[in-house]
Image: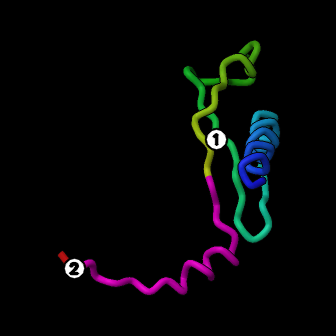
Amino acid sequence: DVKSVLESLSHFMGYRLREGESVHLDGIGYFYPTLKSEKGITRETDRKNEKVRLKGIKFRAHRALKDEVGKLQAQRALR
């Protein structure tokens, strides 16, 4: 069932992204986490890992997906 596959994929991606890794879905693209810190971090900063937070998840489309979308034919909507 498609719903259970997507739920499993979501859990898998969540685990990999939480570990700071990117996730590549062949033919679709790459998902990767971006980070931010509340204050500046230097070499002398203690417990750096506690000062960094998730900013968001970025997506970079695979060339195959871009090529597929590139076949789009735009049409003007009639009102």
* Residue 2, quarter of picture: bottom right
Real-space Cα separation, disc 2 to disc 1, in angstroms: 41 Å
**Relative to 45, does residue 72 appear above or below in the rendering?**
below
* Amino acid at circle 1: Thr
Q: Quadrant of residue 36?
A: top right
What is the span of residues highlighted in magenta in the rendered image?
59-77
Q: Position of residue 23 (x, y in %)?
A: 78, 52
Q: Is residue 53 above or below residue 16?
A: above
Q: Where's residue 73, x and y in %?
A: 44, 86
Q: Quadrant of the C terminus?
A: bottom left
Q: Residue at x 54, y 83 (%)?
A: 70
Q: Secondary structure at mark 2?
A: loop
Residue 19 or residue 71, whichever sits in front = 71
Magenta span contains residue 37: no
Q: Is residue 71 magenta?
A: yes
State which tag comes first along the sequence, 2 or 1. Answer: 1
Residue situated furthest top in the rendering:
46
- Lateral position of residue 79 relative to residue 20, left or right: left
Q: Amino acid at mark 2?
A: Leu
Q: Which residue is mark 1?
A: 34
Task: Please give the label number shown on residue 78.
Answer: 2
Q: Classify 42 as above or below 15.
A: above
Horizontal arrangement in the rendering, residue 8 relative to residue 37 (left or right): right
